[in-house]
Image (spheres, rainbow, N blue to C red):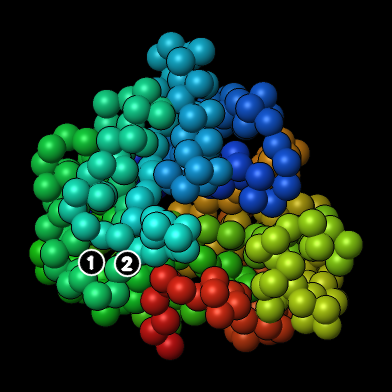
Amino acid sequence: MQKRVLGSSGIEVSAVGYGAMSFSDFYGPTSEAASHAILDLMRDEGVNHLDTSNVYGNGRSEQWIGSYLAKNPGARADFVIATKAGISRDAEGARKLDNDPAHLEGELDKSLKRMGVDHVDLFYVHRREAGRPIEEVAETLERLRRSGKTRAVGFSEIAPSSLRRAAAVTQIDAVQSEYSLATRSPELGLVQACAELGAALVAFSPVGRSILTDDPIRPEQIETVPFLKVNPRFAPGNHQANLALTDGLRALAAEMGEPTAALANAWLLSRGAHILPIPGTRSIQHFRECLRGAALTLTEADLARIEGILPVGWAHGDRYDVVQWIGPERYC
């Protein structure tokens, strides 16, 4: 597995990592044993970048990482662990964003306890609280870094302008954003700002929530996944159009003798040395297909063919609905 550096932190990570939202039931039921099998595969394949959050399964993702580390003494050294905080609930149970210093540190402490570790390697603000100056939040992250509870800091789903403001206060090592052949908006400033400021761009949903794979989710399956059931990109009509368009990518991958997911991840890696895809899956086989992307070197001709099949703006439907857009910053 090729290695890349996490921003300006000096921390080496695998070019392709793993997004442990799939250790929750977000996309369908899973188990502790299945999640531990993914962690076994990561170690076997030299994949060390492990991304989770306090809200994934209400802490279950972190708990299962913790139970794995407890069962495998010495395994902590095989992982660069990233987690997040900043999404909370009010007294009525409604979702809210909280970047208060006490809240962020308190949630990080809970995450450390769930995983049984004394620090994480990267701590993100999961969603920015719009009413709080980002400079204040950056100061909080720097204090947490100095405390030793995290080695590096970052933000998830922020605009390039917000990144610049935060980076004026402290080094921001990573920005996490949805980025794939299906979601190209980061190319309108975020990819460039991260490169300029020495931050990694950690790309979640690199295979477009299955659309960019050999086994895309089918209409009858969408009804069983609450997030996708209301997501515009998977709505009737839009979903069928997206399947038809991505059939061309599947055909190209087959011609090249590679899994479509490998092609999607290889395309992301070609966008810059600071791009780090973190596919999430409950399937060992699918994860292997994603990891194959790190072994591919796409030629200019390959990239041109991919662009010809899926040009910028090809996807039908927005990536989020109105509720899902609460928190992520729009900038274009």
Q: Is residue 7 above or below residue 3?
A: below
Which of the two labelled residues, at mark 2 and mark 1, occupies the earlier sequence position? 2
In this picture, residue 135 sits left or right of residue 95? left
Q: Nearer the viewer, residue 95 or 167?
A: 95
Which residue is tagged 1? 197
Q: Position of residue 300 (x, y in %)?
A: 59, 71
Going by the numbered disc 1, the residue's amino acid type is Leu
Element type where label 1 sits in the image = helix
Element type where label 2 sits in the image = loop
Which residue is tagged 2? 128
In this picture, residue 270 sits left or right of residue 188? right
In this picture, residue 19 sits left or right of residue 174? right
Q: Position of residue 241 (x, y in %)?
A: 82, 81
Residue drawn at x 38%, y 43% as measured from the top left: 82
Residue drawn at x 46%, y 74% as measured from the top left: 326
Q: Residue furthest right?
A: 220
How packed is label 1: few (under 14 Cα within 10 Å), some, or many (20 or more)?
some
What is the quadrant of the C terminus in the image?
bottom left
Q: Position of residue 110 (x, y in %)?
A: 33, 35
**Res 243 quadrant in image:** bottom right
